[in-house]
Amino acid sequence: MTTEQFSKNLSPAAEDERFLYGVSEGIATISINRANKLNALLPDMILAFSDILERARRDPEVRAIVLRGEGRAFCAGDDLAPEDRFKYGPPDMHTRLKMGYPRLVNDILQMRKPVIAMVQGYAVGAGFDLALACDFRIVSPETKMAAIFVKRGLGGGCSYLLPRYVGMGKATEMLLLGDMVEMEEAKALSLVTKVVEPADLEAETYALAARLAAGATQAIGAIKNARNQGLGCDPVKGLEWLVQAEAECMFHLDAREGPRAFAERRAANFTGNWIDLQYDDFDPNYR
């Protein structure tokens, strides 16, 4: 399937028409469809976005996910228009974790499938944090990234992930100044995976997505979890998460297929399927 076909396969998501969704050849595409507002997010959109990510997570046909935005931006962050701050409950920590964009950062980080951000135009504020949460970021040269919160009198955004990419010193500079980062510098800082010309952006993104979708996706999920857990613990506990990832992979058929294909000198046919440990028959109509 050509990259144009991936785009044409998108349709308004059942959860919210401000998102487009489609699945082709094992790749789910989620596109923010609010181009007139540079794909800025409203609270109800965050709920819908989370539901769409959950749909992709549950779908066994989905083996990789591409996040993108319609128009000339990836995502310009939270929409700062006045809102009913009590619509979803008091604006406390619990509500913010439920309704604020950090919910999406958590959803993407914990996703046991590879997630690629296809980025053009603005990826600022919450949009920058969402891109950082993805496993890969393929960007066009004119992309602008910034932890812009401080320039709006806001704070906290990007403060978890950014230091893990660029270190404390550079993260402090970016968080406290909120300046735009050009893509040449972003590549040098490892904030982006690859910078490609706009005409090649879709092709490069979906080529990577196809490669990941054909891979050992259950192993990818276990590796991502070990990586996430290892970021916040001591070395011994980090090695325990490594061992746990290896043990978890033993429940995947891919852990048999990989060594077998290597021994037979052939390409592996990974499926992402678990070994079925359902010993007893069950009644699907049981209530």
Image: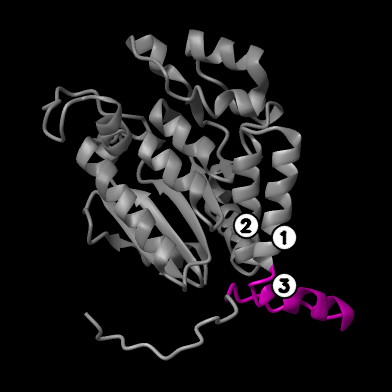
Give the labeled residue for mark 2.
Answer: 222
User: How far across and how far down the image is residue 29, in percent?
Assistant: 42, 58
Residue 90 found in image quarter: top left
Which mark is drawn over residue 237? none
User: How far across and how far down the image is residue 129, in percent?
Assistant: 46, 32
Residue 206 found in image quarter: bottom right
Mark earlier in primary sequence (1, 3): 1
Instruction: Name the residue nearer the viewer: 43 or 17.
Output: 43
Gap between marks 2 and 1, in whole Å? 8 Å
Which tag is nearer the camera, tag 2 or tag 1? 1
Q: Quadrant of the C terminus?
A: bottom left
User: How far across and how far down the image is residue 152, in percent?
Assistant: 33, 12
Image point 51% across, 31% down: which residue? Answer: 143
The residue at the far front in this view is 280
Q: Secondary structure at mark 1?
A: helix
Residue 41 visible? The answer is yes
Tags 2 and 1 touching, CB below 8 Å: yes
Residue 258 is covered by the magenta coloring: yes
Give the labeled residue for mark 1.
Answer: 246
Give the labeled residue for mark 3.
Answer: 255
Instruction: Name the residue nearer the viewer: 164 or 252.
Output: 252
Q: Amino acid at mark 2?
A: Ala
Q: Secondary structure at mark 2?
A: helix
Gap between marks 3 and 2, in whole Å? 12 Å
Q: Secondary structure at mark 3?
A: helix
> In the displayed structure, would residue 64 be above or below residue 83?
below
> In the displayed structure, would residue 12 be above or below residue 259?
above
Tags 3 and 2 touching, CB below 8 Å: no
Residue 182 shown left or right of residue 82 in the figure: right
Image point 60% across, 79% down: which residue? Answer: 275
Q: Which residues are magenta?
A: 250-273
